[in-house]
Amino acid sequence: MGARGPVVPRATTQGERIAVGGTAPGGTVGRVPGLPRVHVRRHRLSERLETASRGAVTVVVAPSGAGKTLGVAGWLHQTGRAAETLWVTATGDLDADRLHVLLEKTREQHEGVDEGYRRLVVDDAHRLPISAVSYLDRELSLRPDGLSVVLLSQWDLPLSSLVPELLGHFTVVRGGVLRLDEEEAAALVAEHTDIDSPEVVDAIMTHAQGWCAPVVLVAKAVATAADPIAAVRRLAAGVGGVNTQVAKESFATLHPRERHLLLCLAGEDTVTAETSEHLSGDPHAGAVLAGLETTGLLVTRIADDPDADGKGRAEDIGVVYRVHPILVQSARQMLRSGGAEAERAKAQVMRAVRADLSGGEPDRAFARSTYVDEPLEAVGILRDEGPRLLFRGHGTSIRAFARRYPDVVQTQHGAWLTLALERWLVGDTSSASEWMDRWSSALPTSQDVPPEPAVAAVALMRARLGLEPIEDALELAHSVDGTVGARRGDPLLPLLLVEMGATENWLGRLADAEAHLTSAVLLSRAQRLPALTAQALSHQALTEFLRGREHAAVKVAAEAMRGLADQTWHPAGTAARAQVALDLARTQDLVRPTSEVADWSAVLHPDDLATRYWARLLGARRMLLRGEVADAERALDVPWDGPPIPDHARAAALVEQSLQAAVSSDRDTLTRIVDDLDGIGAVGEASFAAALRADLIGDARRAAALFATAAAQGTLTQPAVVPLARACRAQVIDGLGRPDEALDLLRSALAATEVRRNGLAFLGWSRSGTPIRLLLARAQDAGTSQWGAELAAVDQPGLTAFLGPTTPTPHERSHITSSVVRPTLSPREREVLLELARGATYADIAANLVVSENTVKTHVSSLYAKLAVGRRSDALAVARTLRLV
């Protein structure tokens, strides 16, 4: 036989603990996988990785069975980097948020925070969702410093690699480096066969193409053959290629106990000794797994289970294993093909499934009955435990089952509700409505039986889509006898409470919404329904904001987001709802402003009326604060595509529009808003809009009186009209020569907003009154409060004063048609235009720009020509309308 390559002993010991989690949503997170008890060093790969690791991101691309996992793990162990490396085995749930958390752990070490991790390795990176890949792409392009990531993938990832490669931040290591050379292959073959023949090694290398797993499997398959070379050729010539054939042959060479174990584990992503004993019925399954792991290819140790107590029959009771994909595929084919061994394994798995169900643990029972192809058993579980499984995060497997076994599902009425809820919660309201109609039509029609939580919950869902009267659906929900559902732990009861809270949020019954959502959180936690808990918390966060409790909204929204990070599946729009509540609360804080927020409207659920509505108001508010007044106005002018808007929500939008109109000097719109607010009985809010109009036309005394009425009769908490009116009245009263009264009003507004950190009132909405920053500075000198001092330090010039010169009035916009082409101005022309907007004379402009007055006149003439105007006022009107200033 050829010369054997260097062999190193196992580098880790059993009993290692994971510092950052174990088997969890988004992948198995922990330490670098331990090396097998016999491991062949990969010199070429190690040298290539050593060079590539100096960059930010390294992608190792090779097919399954190439030895990516053990090759990279071996390099890390051999170079002493294993202890400072965070390793995650990816799934489709490792989204951008979870990846961000992992990357920040490694960045902390680079920034001097000793968290113990300097790099991140993502195994099975081809399973990452596009959101995670896009996030990593942005980090690679914008923040490569401190980034140290190795991705192991079966194919190329869609990363923008050209510029990072040129800068040395990105490297791709192709599969050719992973192929075994003759010496490495000989060493590997020698460990799995007693055949001492270079010809056999050459034959194996030829037909396994140098990939690790096929080399091992072929070696094991031909170990007992009378003619090893002929056996290799026969395997390579078989249908399905060498991997499929040798996997089948390798099964034949395994001990019956090993084959039985692998067949029982064919549906598991990762397993522990405890799980393997449970599924196989073999009390020594942990030891069998440990034995299979010695090759490092058939079964791989990927992490230690942090929840294991270290006690048990098996030596490696706390270890998490993964069976090689080639063997998993072969085992699944054998299960589908049948035979004595397959039937025995199926029977044993189903015994484990029934034991789980009788013990009140249905979580894995459904998936396991599916992968051993027992759909009748699975649909029975779906009928009895479907909603519970759904709210525990098994929505993806439920959907897959429905698509795989449509005929079986059609026969089981009890499962239709779960299928309807699954479709509803992911936002497919059309399919959900079809399942709801079928399920409802099959229910008993007796009028003497009180409605169940499911019936009332479905009615509320349909009502928010406009398919049923909302008030009737809410009345039905209140008639449900909740004690029955609570006694038997019905997961549909907390669902009903969530639906009631969401509906009451929309209707403005916030106290009722808070009570129902709080109960939903408590019940869903008690029943271990994390997906429903996160959904209830996200609605609760919005409720807190609507009640004027911004600080509580931030805390609850953050709690919901943390809960989502631990889940593999959750209802569509939950994360967006929590983020909208968070952004709504934080946008009001002028002292600690947030970065730009995203448009969440595309990912919000169609029936999430309150969140959709307030997300629209959030977008308009952000546009207004950026100075994009016309865009803010258009955002609220878009027709609402849902049920009729309740009066309280209409009032909120009208007050928001009145603030926009105050900035753009739109008297006519303010007049209309006053009439609309009066029409829905919002007297205080109508007075506020009327006060803004009076202030706009310079009637300070009338404005002061109307602001006083608004402060006394305003009812809205969002926008908070009372402190708004007090702050505006303080500006006007001070301008009228009553500074002491103005200071008292300002103190009152500060006291009303301090806990909430709501700075909206202090943006300077009055045009005729004293600038708000002067009032805040005077209040700071008088020692009012910490909140007042923080606002004074922001040095807000006043929104109307700041945006007024650059915001086109309605008259100006009406004279500029949409067909006017936006001209291209030179840098000097833009400077002159800005000086004109400031009201500077030609002499002032010449002095400021250090040019002659004749030069200024030349630039002004060029500006007038490009804007097609003949005087300064027209030029500024066009410039404001076209956003040139």
Image (cartoon, rainbow, N blue to C red):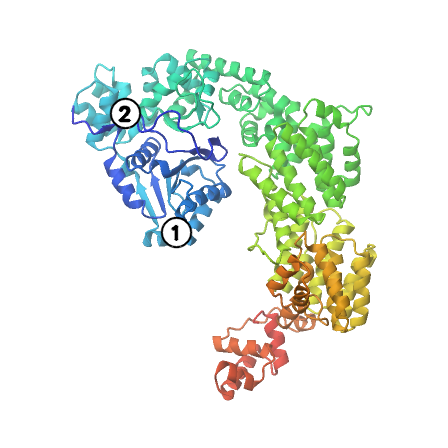
**Position in image of residue 673 (x %, y %):** 77, 61
Could you give the CA–CA distance between mark 1 and mark 2, rounded to whole angstroms? 37 Å
Which residue is pictured at 80% across the width and 23% down the height?
A: 449
- Depth check: give the residue in front, 461 or 503: 503
Left or right: 226, with 584 as reference point: left
Left or right: 572, with 673 as reference point: left
**Position in image of residue 375 (x %, y %):** 55, 20
Q: Earlier in the sequence, mark 1 or mark 2?
A: 2
- Asked if one can make out residue 604 in the rendered structure from this viewpoint, the answer is no
Q: Please count the marks in the image.
A: 2
Q: Residues within 10 Å of mark 2 (few under 14, many from 20)?
A: some
Residue type pointed to by label 2: Val
Left or right: 296, with 595 as reference point: left
Image position of 63 with respect to 701: above or below: above
**Position in image of residue 877 (x %, y %):** 63, 75
The answer to which image quadrant residue 481 occupies is top right
Q: Which residue has dot 2 on it?
A: 38
Q: Residues within 10 Å of mark 1 (few under 14, many from 20)?
A: some
Which residue is pictured at 32% across the width and 22% down the height?
A: 294
Tag shown at residue 35: none
The answer to which image quadrant residue 758 occupies is bottom right
Residue type pointed to by label 1: Asp
Q: Which residue has dot 1 on it?
A: 145
Image position of 668 with respect to 24: above or below: below
- As drawn, the residue found furthest toward the bottom would be 854
Which residue is pictured at 21% across the width and 18% down the height?
A: 194
**Position in image of residue 540 (x %, y %):** 67, 41
